[in-house]
Image (cartoon, rainbow, N blue to C red):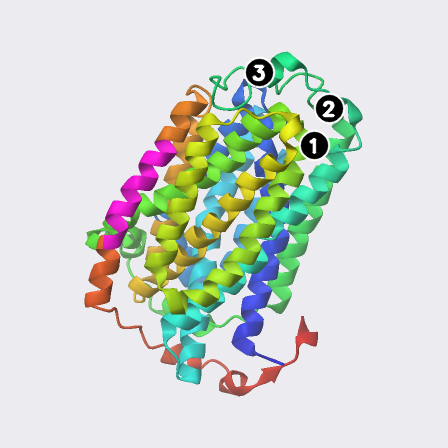
Amino acid sequence: MISRNFKNVLVVSIGFLSLFTAYGGLQSLQSSLNAEQGMGVASLSVIYASIILSSMFLPPIMIKNLGCKWTIVAGMACYVSYSFGNLYPGWYTLIPTSVILGLGGSPLWSAKCTYLTISGNVQASKDNKKGSDVINHYFGIFFFIFQSSAVWGNLMSSLIFGQDTSISNIPEEVLETCGASDCGLTIEVNSTSSKPAQKLVWTLVGCYIGVGVLAMLIVGIFLDNIDHQQTSQFRENREPFWHTFLATFRLLKDWRLLMLIPLTMYSGFEQSFLSGEYTKNYVTCALGIHFVGFVMMCFGATNSLSSFLFGRIARYTGRTALFFFAAATNFACIIALLFWRPHPDQLPVFFVFPALWGMADAIWQTQTNALYGVLFPRDKEAAFANYRMWESLGFVIAFAYSTFLCLEYKLYIVLAVLMLSMITYPVVEYYEHKNPTKPTEQPTYENHKKTEESDIVSQTWM
């Protein structure tokens, strides 16, 4: 037996799980599968550049006009288009669909964060609990379910590509270029021996398209439209376009948001490193592309379990202790990766790094999202749009220098951004400790179908 708010959290989580089973698997493979002229990495860079553009104005406009539910559905459709582009990968298919995905990405994530924040505040008011605790709990549940998408998406790719035995033959001269000891720009990942058969690629992408469409159906059918009254009022009493357009930038007047930019950008740097550099320079280089899925499954499983765990224990340890624990974990991994020479004989080591990285990423994702929801309760749409914009800028920069900087320098850059974020973030946390932000009451949301707030729905609805 679960409450309606909790049921909605599960629906959103399962929808994102299905959607990112497809996108996460494709993202992990881009640097290896579409390595010609850096086409795969270029498409990822275009995606996050487009997310930056959409973050500037689309989230407040779409959420206030369509509501959170239908903004999520529209954003999911944009992600599915990228899977279609990978059926016949080329500059004329990947780049346009990358732009479409990017334009829908920021509204999708902003709507999800807004939806979970609203649900958490409503449930906290109903249960007479602290709003930030319930929001933390909801984000923990979301990322516990969502991050497991890396398991299923990458399992699909490894099982399908594993049918081609020719891609597992890695010559000794290629092994010598793996890791940070060599520059990492001359890896022969585009040789015929490292690419799976085209029929297997089509099979995988077809499966990804199917689970993406399933995600749209899950959200469209089962998710409650909890803010439909607010969207109706907004359409009846429209604000001037420029007022909505500039909502994201007006929030930059808040110094707290400015101090969180390094932390937010680091989230993009660390995720892009694992999915773009680690998979290519360590896994594909030394083991073969069919091992990328298995290694990223380890990342996804650890990330998922850690998200659930840290979402629950944050109320006891506080955010600061978790952030510094994640920073220490990533710091240790970066130093180790600088000196490690990957070789097929060291198979367990290939899984240790993504496991530790997944544990740290769980903290970056759950706690940073929850932090934005707690600090900016009156400007949720603009706050989460800023989050996606600055995180995406980290992705763009990392993917942009991917094709011309040596791996050693990339590790140094990630390390530098990490150290900077651990200098600026505590300032915000100290100020919040001394001057706690009061949560915004949500009486209008509680008026939506009053009987629903007290109803208990069974899990069979799912």
In the picture, the quarter occupied by the N terminus is bottom right
Drawn side of residue 279 relative to residue 164, left or right: left
Q: CA distance from mark 2 to mark 1?
A: 7 Å
Q: CA distance from mark 1 to mark 3?
A: 20 Å
> Which quadrant holds the C terminus?
bottom right
Residue occupied by mark 2: 167
Look at the image and give the residue range highlighted in magenta: 413-426
Q: Is residue 3 above or below residue 72?
A: below
Using the rendered image of the protein, determine whether residue 145 is visible from the camera's viewpoint. yes
Magenta stretch encompasses residue 84: no
Pointer 2 with pointer 1, Cβ within 8 A: yes
Does label 1 or label 3 sit earlier along the sequence?
3
Seen at 35% across and 47% down, the residue is 264
Q: Secondary structure at mark 3?
A: loop
Residue 67 in view: no
Amino acid type of the residue tagged 2 in the rendering:
Ile
At label 1, the amino acid type is His
Discs 1/3, front: 3
Residue 423 magenta: yes
Q: Quick one: 101 or 6, which is closer to the camera?
A: 6
Left or right relative to 422: residue 168: right
Residue 245 at x, y percent in the picture: 31, 51
- Secondary structure beneath dot 2 equals helix
Q: Is residue 35 rendered to the left or right of residue 336? A: right
Identify the residue shown where x is 55% and y is 36%: 97
Count the labels in the image: 3
In-front residue for pair 8/266: 266
Which residue corresponds to mark 1? Answer: 290
| Residue denoted by label 3 | 176
Image coordinates for residue 386, horizontal then vertical, percent? 34, 50
